[in-house]
Amino acid sequence: MKFIVAVIKPFKLDDVREALTALGVTGMTVTEVKGFGRQKGQTEIYRGAEYTTNMVPKVKIEVAVAADLASRAIEAIQQAAHTGAIGDGKIFVFDMSGVVRIRTGETNETAL
């Protein structure tokens, strides 16, 4: 099993969700986050005054998948989140040693 964490641009969330759903991914956790990388922040205008923020709004997606589905899920996220512009995001992949569905007690891949 693999645990995939993707940090993407917020407006690409629906595209990524649809791509993962098409693969058979049945659930995900989404968190609104802020951060920076090569973008180094952004300039915004608030009430007529321009100011610079060093944190850029992003969306973090967390999804657990069976090992045989991981490479297709990663590819789907990459294609759906791609704009070609700086700040498209990152995908992190971790090995997952176990999972338990609290309601039923199912474990590992049957719990996904």
Image (cartoon, rainbow, N blue to C red):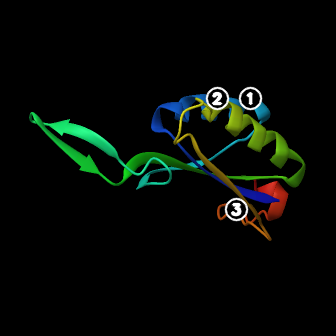
| 87 horizontally vs 46: left or right | right
Q: CA distance from mark 2 to mark 3?
A: 24 Å
Q: CA distance from mark 2 to mark 1?
A: 6 Å
Residue drawn 65% across and 30% down? Answer: 80
Q: Nearer the viewer, mark 3 or mark 1?
A: 1
User: Residue 111 placed where, x, y %?
Assistant: 76, 57
Residue nearest the viewer, comparing 21 with 87: 87
Residue nearest the viewer, comparing 56 with 105: 56
User: Residue 51 placed where, x, y %?
Assistant: 19, 45
Q: CA distance from mark 3 to mark 1?
A: 23 Å
Q: Is residue 45 above or below residue 3?
A: above
Number of callouts in the render? 3
| 73 horizontally vs 46: left or right | right
Q: Is residue 37 above or below residue 75?
A: below
Q: What residue would you read off at disc 1? A: 22
User: Residue 86 placed where, x, y %?
Assistant: 53, 39
Amino acid type of the residue that numbered disc 2 sits on in the rendered structure:
Glu
Q: What residue would you read off at disc 2? A: 18
Q: What residue would you read off at disc 3? A: 101
